[in-house]
Image: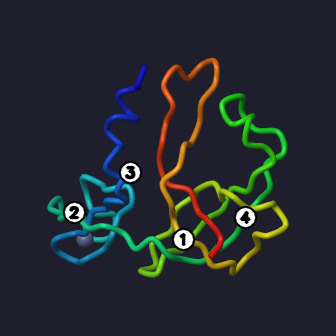
Amino acid sequence: MISPRYHREIPQRYRLEAGRCADCGEIHFPPRAVCRKCGARESTTVVLPNRGKVVTCTVVDIPPAEFDDQKPYVNAIVELENGVRLTCMVAEAPPDAVDIGTEVELIFRRLRCGREWEVLQYGYKARVV
Ligand SMILES: [Zn+2]
């Protein structure tokens, strides 16, 4: 079963859609109803760049059950080319291939599955470039 939250977040998870404040231009990811910088309530949808660098990362050896088939993996905070930061898993790389400053691109991948998740969930992960 797909949770309402997962369904609501599909534009961000699938298409990297963020919100740009109509007043000050601040970009929020995920989009916010109220700008955290100036308090404005109007925003437009923008698509984030898919390239960036790892700001920090950690290796996950003992993950939650729904990620168990992917261990060990790296979780990273990635700063995109426009300065927006997000947290994601790094796919298709051994843990020692990822470090601070590693250049990555965001790709569309399966996120999780397992006994408690009857429907596979998809979204973005980083990949070393
Ligand atoms: Zn603003």
In x, y percent, where is residue 120? 51, 31
**How far is disc 3 from disc 2 in space, using C-alphas?**
14 Å
Circle 4 — which element?
Answer: strand
Task: Between label 1 and label 2, give the one nearer the viewer.
Answer: 1
Residue 48 vs residue 84: left or right?
Answer: left
Is there CB contact under 8 Å for labels 1 and 4? Answer: no
Q: What residue type is labelled 1?
A: Glu
Q: Residue 105 carries which label?
A: 1
In the depicted structure, whether residue 79 falls above or below residue 63: below
Q: Which residue, given by chain and number where applicable, does mark 2 sit on? A: 45
Badge 3 residue CB within 8 Å of ligand 1:
no
Q: Residues within 10 Å of mark 4 (few under 14, many from 20)?
A: many
Quadrant occupied by the N terminus: top left
In x, y percent, where is residue 54? 64, 73
Front one among 123 and 19: 123
At a point 71% along the width and 28% down the height, the residue shown is 65
**How far is disc 3 from disc 1 in space, using C-alphas?**
14 Å
In the depicted structure, whether residue 129 falls above or below residue 89: below
Residue 43 vs residue 122: left or right?
Answer: left
Q: Which residue, given by chain and number where applicable, does mark 3 sit on? A: 14
**How far is disc 2 from disc 4 in space, using C-alphas?**
28 Å
Q: Quadrant of ligand 1?
A: bottom left
Q: Residues within 10 Å of mark 3 (few under 14, many from 20)?
A: some
In x, y percent, where is residue 69? 74, 36
Of the image marks 3 and 4, the number of the one nearer the N terminus:
3
Q: Which amino acid does label 4 sit on?
A: Cys
Is there CB contact under 8 Å for labels 3 and 1? Answer: no
Q: Residue 57 carries which label?
A: 4
Of the image marks 1 and 4, the number of the one nearer the N terminus:
4
Is there CB contact under 8 Å for labels 3 and 2? Answer: no
Q: How crowded is mark 2: few (under 14 residues within 10 Å), some or many (20 or more)?
A: some
